Image (tube, helix red, strand yellow):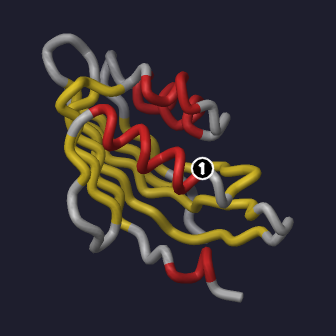
Amino acid sequence: MSESSVILDAEGQWMTDFFRDADKLDLPLLMSWFAQDIDLRIANMPPVIGWSAVEKSFADFWANLSGMSHRAEELVVKGDNGAQMSIVTYTRKDGKTVSMPVASHIRRNASGKFDRLWIYIDINPLFAE
């Protein structure tokens, strides 16, 4: 297996801080990262636009989970844009763990809040029996 690669500019810590917070499954903490006009896209599902709609989307998704952990394989941050390729391990409510590759693209607005979170994933293995 190749060694993980992390490429950060001087301001890149925000990206690793976000994934640390996301793994806590703390909805108010997660939502504190997002702008009111957040654009969330997950896999091939329709875009979810706006803070309230994104909050509901994460609440619904996390209702199926008791844990989540991102292991960064590649991380590139340049200014207010970042991309992380991860192996994410999800722990379902039934105790089963499922690990899968996930790529995330994040963009911050001028106030430092995220206005874009696009997540590329094949979600089907998570819900397979």
Q: Residue at x 64, y 53 (%)?
A: 63
Measured as percent of width and height from the top left, residue 128 is found at 64, 86
| Vertical comparison of 25 with 86: above or below | above
**Quarter of the rendering containing residue 56:** top left
Measured as percent of width and height from the top left, residue 106 is found at 28, 40
Q: Nearer the viewer, residue 72 or 107?
A: 107
Q: Residue at x 28, y 20 (%)?
A: 113
| Vertical comparison of 94 with 105: above or below | below
Q: Nearer the viewer, residue 70 or 6?
A: 70
| Vertical comparison of 54 with 88: above or below | above
Measured as percent of width and height from the top left, residue 33 is found at 39, 24
Q: Residue at x 33, y 17 (%)?
A: 10
| Vertical comparison of 76 with 113: above or below | below
User: Which part of the image, by quadrant, shows the C terminus?
Assistant: bottom right
- Residue located farthest toward the top when viewing the structure as drawn: 111
Q: Which residue is mark 1?
A: 70
In the drawing, does residue 97 fall left or right of residue 113?
right
- Residue located farthest toward the left when viewing the structure as drawn: 110
Amino acid carrying label 1: it is: His
- Residue located farthest toward the right when viewing the structure as drawn: 95
Q: Residue at x 27, y 29 (%)?
A: 114
SS type, badge 1 = strand
